[in-house]
Image (spheres, grey):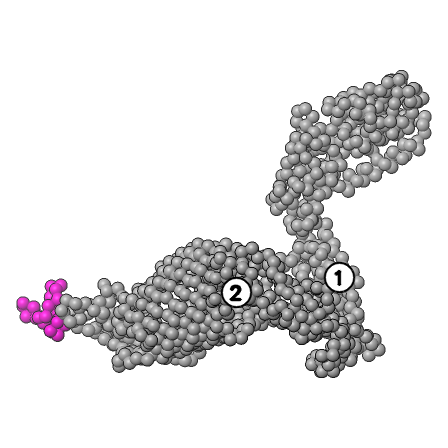
Amino acid sequence: MTAIQTGASRRSCNIRNYALALLAGTTLAGLPQAALAQAEDDAQQTDQAAEQADPAADTTGPVAALQQGDVIRSISVQGVQRLEPNTILSYVRLRPGDTYTTAAADQALKDLAATELFESFSIRNDNGNVVIEVEENPVINRIILEGNERLKDDKIVPEIKLAPRQIFTRSKVRADVARIIELYKRQGRFAATVEPKTVQLSQNRVDLVFEITEGPKSKVRQINIIGNEEFSDGDLKGEMVTKETGLFSFLSGNTGYDPDRLAFDQQKLREFYLKQGYVDFRVVSAVAELTPDKRDFIITYVVEEGERYKFGDVEVTSEIRDFNGETLTQGLGITSGDWYDAQRIEDTVEQLSELAGRFGYAFADVRPQFRRNSDDLTMDVTLVINEAPRVYIERVDINGNTLTQDKVIRREFRSAEGDPFNSLQVERTTARINSLGFFQEGFEVEQKETGEDDRIILEANVVEQPTGELQLSAGFSSLESFLFSGSIRQRNFRGRGQTVGASAQFSRYSRSFNLSFSEPYVFDRNISAGVDLYRRDVSSFNFLGNDREPSFKQATTGGSLRLGVPLTEYSTIVGSYTLNYDQVSVDERLYFRDLDGDGTTECDPLQASRFLCDVIGDRVSSILGLNYVYSSLNSYYRPSRGERITLGASFAGLGGDVKYAKFTANASKYWSVFGGFIFSLSAEGGYIKGLEDRGPGVDDVRLTDRFFLGEPQFRGFDIRGVGPRILRQPYVDGENGPELITDRDRVRDDSLGGSAYYLGRAELEIPLGSGARELGLRPSIFVDVGALFNVTTPTLIDYPNGLQGTDADGNPQYVEDGLIVTDPLDDEGNANTPYILPNSRVREVFLGDSASPRVSIGAGVDWNSPFGPFRIDFAYALRKEPGDDTKTLSFNVGTQF
């Protein structure tokens, strides 16, 4: 591979070293663009000098035997391969019969050079026979890019003007080099270099190779601010979008240099100072300097802060008779003497415009007028509400819906044709249509003028998006171990807004199937209805140390019907009826024994505990429920403002085998704070009351109907790690008799649940830069407080020496030669060893039934990973009760949360 070379003609007569100046012997690949441009300038200067030189000067060169004043008898062309000689002759102005002069020869050389078709060329005069010798530029066989990793060929090739089968010219190559470098500058890679080279081929062809060195992305190494006295560099840098490169700069994603961002940062600085009252603030200059190695930028701002102003007289004047300026002035909340804040003025203008819109003045114009008092450094502000007519809705237009029926969208409008315009209702309409999830984000109801001052058209231009969902996922969680799930759902079935779906999930401890259908508007009335059919198989477990042991299995087959009626714009009441058939069983090999000696096995309380034996059996639950839901959240999936309250009550006992009353409550509120942070508070609680007497020492609420608390609801605690539980502590033989094992790693832990609980959370979601947002990272810090309690104290056992077995008649049993017998003596009259029932040397301890709050703090992060939604939490339990199981790390991936 050789560097591109361009030969130049040299002329005799009065043009000294013309060819040398005309890029003679230069290598395009090795010269920067600036050097190439400078070479052309030098050539022009040399040419001008040659024209001014002595005509009689004697030079030597390719133009031999130049004879000034000869009449041109003939002109011939030598060296052509592709071009016709007549074509080349058409480029020059020499013609037979003309007088051959130095100026004419010089002009001919310039004309040939201007075509950029020749690598070298020369002219000689032999007694009036002029010969033009040329060497044509090669033809490009192919164009090759090497070294480009960040920008692929499909991004660069469209910018290259040269193409195969075109004539190779140096100027076009230089232009393509500039285009490629510009592409890399747009990517922030100012150190990128491009070296063009050629590979010589037969038949005067070449392969053109662009060797690209991409270099690192140019970062902002340092931001300097000069002239700031009232605020530190850190305060001002915090307002800028551009960030300095640092240890955690990968979280920002804005460390690269961008001229547009530089201009935006200047505006951000001005906005910041205006909020603080510095109305004369200005950015004197903003300079970005590229370091010599082209790897980093240093940005320097020179600012003038000026004086700080306070509010002077602030008033509202209204030309709309429905609004009283004095009354509005009193409600502004801006007091004379407060530090001037431009943001408060903008917010006030927006509030007044919104207020006017709510009263039907869609075209109300609120304009602030300022009067600066330099003497006392105050700013008088007059907010003028200009006269505007009351506006009515002429019609509602819906466009763009190809699948969704018109009525599905129209029924979400809070305003109808002929109604007075109300901006609040328009905003609510926009929110409701967005909440459908049928259309692309960013939808807004547009307001179109009709040509009449008192009429307006509301227009919904929707862009439909796919509403069918097919999801197959596999994952691992600390709660369910390995899990697999699949679901199919259509959220806009037949374009009617109906939702149908089916799902299945399998994991190590559970499996479930579900079919669902919901209709948001039954018979086109504002009443929602739905039905669910399901089957759930759950394997419960207890703990022996960190190992899980099977406890009981519960298979639930059932269905539910629900009906919702809106009470107000933000509240709904939902009634439901649920019918469940539950089958609860335990592993008979582990927990069953022939207690009566009649050959029939049954659950042994010594093996399974009495509470576990109590839950075994089949039963039917008939549950009637009622829920009140209030929601003003701006987003169901990731809210940043608003609140949601849910109050629920359910009654089991309308037939069936189970009788209880259950009450639940859940409330949450979200705020956007500190410029991007999202703070939330939430609280929930529940109480269940059994309505049947199930005997002494037995809780009125079955184990399967109680509340449980722990991971994942209560971070910092293990699965079912909070609340009442039984610890089965074994006895072992010691030097002084039976010794009790209390080590939690060797004790079986059975959670009993509770009939009452509460749980509160405070969480602050921390905003990250665009780079982290693109990865789907959402970190947060939190505090959780809660408790689970209120269960009947179970009957406990304590057998240090174990419990001796008996036969069906109640006779004690013994062991003789490995066999179980009822004879206390063997054949020789020696005493047989009493037969001690397996696992009967235990003591049961009841712990955790306390309403005292447990408290945990921690940090976590949500990540929309390629494997599915991922959540990881690090939490530490600050306060716990005896018996509670804590857990520092928990995570979940592959399922929704």
Q: Is residue 107 above or below residue 783?
A: above
Real-space Cα separation, disc 2 to disc 1, in angstroms: 41 Å
- Foreground pick, 503 / 294: 503
Q: Which residues are magenta?
A: 806-830
Residue matched to label 2:
637
Q: Are marks 2 and 1 in contact (CB under 8 Å)?
A: no
Label 2: which secondary element: loop
On the question of residue 134 being in view, the answer is yes
Amino acid, disc 2 = Tyr
Residue matched to label 1:
301
Q: Is residue 69 above or below residue 584?
A: above
Name the image quarter holding residue 393.
Answer: bottom right
Judged by depth in the image, the label closer to the viewer, 2 or 1, is: 2
Tell me, yes or no, whether the highlighted magenta stretch contains residue 818: yes
- Horizontal placement of 67 versus 520: left or right? right
Residue 366 appears at what percent x and percent y?
A: 74, 72
Label 1: which secondary element: strand
The structure residue drawn at horizontal position 27% and vertical position 66%, both measured from the top left corner, is: 586
Nearer the N terminus, badge 2 or badge 1?
A: 1
